[in-house]
Amino acid sequence: MNSAYGRLCGFTGGALILLGITMLTTMLIFLITGHSPIPTGGVGHYFLAFTGSVLVAWGLSLRLASRNSELAYLLAPANAIGMALMAFYRSVIVLSSADVRAWIGFIPMGEALLFGGLAIAFWWGRPKPLQV
């Protein structure tokens, strides 16, 4: 497998795992203390934990794909689409939500560029199918 693509999968997977664990931890801290750095209540933390769980699973699949070119080839389109959707919704939310802009400004636009770049890398950098 292309070692750069393997590193892309491994690094991105590790980052998603850490982000997911952070989200899950934030939810647990909210449940224990009633306080959180994220300005939302119980329902928001429910969705935070859901997202964190999904990110951990996605990250683990990318970590596995970093060592298996056949798996990386199969997962490449899903990863590219997932990253593209993350870029899209960040662009939409920052342009349409005054609440988001008041809380974190235009940071999601930078995230949209990051995830858009990852979508391109996962799509065009994907390994070739194995020939049998």
Image (cartoon, rainbow, N blue to C red):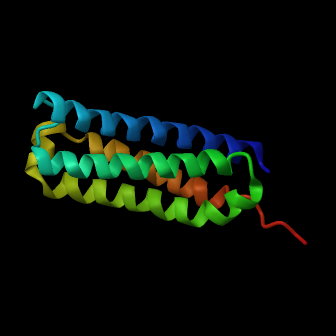
Q: Which of 1 and 33 is in front in this view?
A: 33
Pick the quarter of the image with the C terminus: bottom right
Give coordinates of residue 125: x percent, y percent. 67, 55
Q: In the visual, does 93 lie left or right of 81?
A: left
Specify the quadrant of the image occupied by residue 77. bottom right
Q: In the visual, does 4 lie left or right of 131?
A: left
**32 relative to 72, above or below:** above
Q: In the visual, does 58 lie left or right of 44?
A: right
* Residue at image point 41% right, 53% down: 54
Q: Which of 84 and 95 is in front in this view?
A: 84
Q: Is residue 71 visible?
A: yes
**45 relative to 30, above or below:** below
Give coordinates of residue 29: x percent, y percent. 22, 30
- Residue extending farthest front: 32
Q: Is residue 37 visible?
A: no
**123 relative to 1, above or below:** below
Give coordinates of residue 100: x percent, y percent. 15, 46
* Residue at image point 47% right, 40% down: 17
* Residue at image point 34% right, 60% down: 88
**38 relative to 108, above or below:** above
- Residue extending farthest bottom: 132
Give coordinates of residue 60: x percent, y percent. 56, 46
Q: In the visual, does 15 lie left or right of 7?
A: left
